[in-house]
Image (cartoon, rainbow, N blue to C red):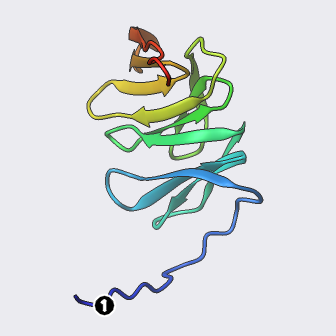
Amino acid sequence: APAVVMRPAMRLDGHKDRVYDVAWAPNGRSLLSVGQVGGFVWSLDGPRVALEGDELMRACWHVDGSTVFTGSSQGKIDVRSAADGALATTLDTSQDDEVYGLEMPSDHLLAGAGNTMQLWDVARAERLERVTFARAEGG
């Protein structure tokens, strides 16, 4: 088998505590990271952008790369500008549990929060669908 050699390309200094999730931008030129205290958009083409928040558990990019989503342990999803971190809106999953997953496979955001899966129209800040999962016997 061929040997795999990994070498650090750069050091990203910013997080002072745990990092919980990272996500590459659709163009591959920026990285989004979130953690126990805030998050960052790291760009190869510009300065680092700080994102405010506590216990940001999940990170996701809009398919066009202009917007980032961060899911918190309080069940909230912040929608922010990737360019400057400005908050556009906050989506409330109405869950008392954390956001466990964020994906944007198309023009809608899919979120896993608590025991639900939710589909959001981000442009209208509207939840389109919410499915509650039943607990499995013995699970």
Q: Eyeballing the image, is 70 above or below 89?
A: below
Q: Position of residue 128 (x, y in %)?
A: 37, 9
Q: Eyeballing the image, is 52 above or below 129?
A: below
Q: Which residue is mark 1?
A: 3
Q: Eyeballing the image, is 100 above or below 15?
A: above
Tell me the residue at 72%/46% (across/down). 36
Q: Position of residue 117 (x, y in %)?
A: 42, 19
Residue type beneath disc 1: Ala
Label total for image: 1
Tell me the residue at 48%/81% (across/down). 9
Tell me the residue at 68%/25% (across/down). 74
Left or right side of 75 for 104: left
Tell me the residue at 46%/86% (across/down). 7
Q: Position of residue 106 (x, y in %)?
A: 26, 31
Left or right side of 6 for 93: right
The one of 76 and 31 positioned closer to us in this rendering: 76
